[in-house]
Amino acid sequence: MSVLSIAIKTGLLTSNVRNLSRGIADIGTAGKLGVMTSSLQEFLNGRANISMASKLGLMTSDLQLLLNTIGRQGAIGLIFGLLMKR
């Protein structure tokens, strides 16, 4: 899938898609998810937080276990999946 097609499906700018694919949170992506940029960046860095746990319908401890299992690339993919579902 191209960056442009992902941007169209998610409603993000292509720059947001590129940033997210590198594990960098920005205000556009965080805004689409309804979380603060810092919460999204913590998540992408492998640290669970209440904001992201709530978005995923998980307890923070369960989200941390998930992040430990899927790693950084998995976290990025999870965010893309959430955005495409919207």
Image: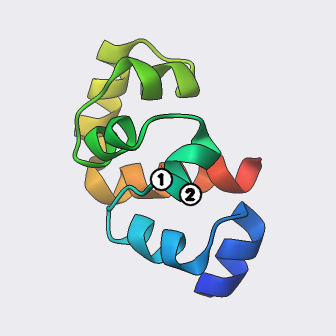
Give the answer, above or below, for where 2 lies relative to 40.
below
Name which residue lies at 32% across and 23% down: 49
Asked whether, in this view, residue 73 is left or right of residue 80, the answer is left
Residue 52 % position (x, y): 45, 29
Q: Residue furthest front?
A: 27
Give the answer, above or below, for where 10 lies relative to 13.
above
* Residue 26 image-quadrant placement: bottom left
Considering the numbered disc 2 on the image, is that residue within a helix, a strand or a loop? helix
Q: CA distance from mark 1 to mark 2?
A: 15 Å
Can residue 1 be spotted in the picture?
no
Residue 30 % position (x, y): 50, 46
Instruction: Name the mark on residue 27.
Output: 1
Name the residue nearer the viewer: 31 or 79.
Answer: 31
Instruction: Name the mark on residue 61.
Output: none
* Residue 40 image-quadrant placement: top left
From the image, tell me which residue sits under label 2.
80
Asked whether, in this view, residue 77 is left or right of residue 47, the answer is right
Residue 62 % position (x, y): 36, 18
